[in-house]
Image: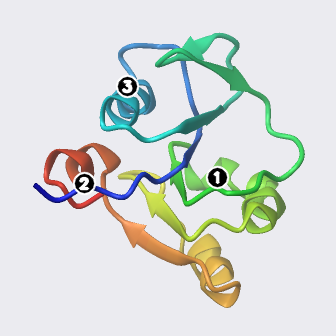
């Protein structure tokens, strides 16, 4: 059996609402053995990890998975770029060509995909 690389993942738009995809992603990422960081505007937790407001850029983040729409993303551009992940996943509804271009300029890979599908198909 192939051992999957563990990818520390920042969930941008994390929520404690079980009906939201960001909440499901948190639980599935943890179940798959990935460490998560929850960043969002709601207080609470998802998958046993507290949801924090964004502040100083983080280090050692492999993937940022986006769960905020393109209209709200500009305020996070500097934070995302300073965090300098290896990749950004644009989940359905979060696609943003401006942020994709900025990421590519900074050597950050981008993918338009669903984190839940990537996890369920072993492509995460």
Report how far apart the C-alphas of labels 2 and 1 lie in the structure: 25 Å
Whole-percent x, y for residue 110 in the image: 48, 74
Q: Element at badge 1?
A: helix
- Where does residue 53 sit, x and y in percent of width and height? 79, 30
Relative depth, front residue between 79 and 85: 85
- In screen coordinates, is 79 left or right of 43? right
Which is closer to the viewer, label 2 or label 1? 2
Q: Earlier in the sequence, mark 3 or mark 2?
A: 3
The residue carrying mark 3 is 27
**Which residue is at a point 68% across and 48% down the rendered structure image?**
72
**Which residue corresponds to mark 2?**
118
Q: Callout 1 environment at 10 Å: few (<14), some (14 to 19), or many (20+)?
A: few
Seen at 18% across and 55% down, the residue is 122
How far apart are the two marked residues, 3 and 1, measured between alpha carbons? Answer: 26 Å
The alpha-carbon separation of the residues under discs 3 and 2 comes to: 14 Å
Q: Is residue 73 left or right of residue 111?
A: right
- Left or right of 74? Residue 24 is left
What crowding class fits label 2: few (fewer than 14 Cα within 10 Å), some (14-19), or many (20 or more)?
few
Disc 1 designates what residue? 71
Which of the labelled discs sits on residue 10, or is there none?
Answer: none
- Which of the 4 quarters of the picture holds residue 55? top right
Where is 21 relative to 58, above or below?
Answer: above
Q: Is residue 62 above or below residue 36?
A: below
Name the residue rendered at 74%, 26% in the picture: 52
Q: How many marks?
A: 3
Tell me whether circle 3 and circle 2 mark residues in contact (CB < 8 Å): no
Residue 41 x/y as whole percent:
72, 26
* Quadrant in which the C terminus is drawn: bottom left
Please identify the quadrant where the N terminus is shown: bottom left
Q: Residue at x 17, y 45 (%)?
A: 120
């Amino acid at each position: 059996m192939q051992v999957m690389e563990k990818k520390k993942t920042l969930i941008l738009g994390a929520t404690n609402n079980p009906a939201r995809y960001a909440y499901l992603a948190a639980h599935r990422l943890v179940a798959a053995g990935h460490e998560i960081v929850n960043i969002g505007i709601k207080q609470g937790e998802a998958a046993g990890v507290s949801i924090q407001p964004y502040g100083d850029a983080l280090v050692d983040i492999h993937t940022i998975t986006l769960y905020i729409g393109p209209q709200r993303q500009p305020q996070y551009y500097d934070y995302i770029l300073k965090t300098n992940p290896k990749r950004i996943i644009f989940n359905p509804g979060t696609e943003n060509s401006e942020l994709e271009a900025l990421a590519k300029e900074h050597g950050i890979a981008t993918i338009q995909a669903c984190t839940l599908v990537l996890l369920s198909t072993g492509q995460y």
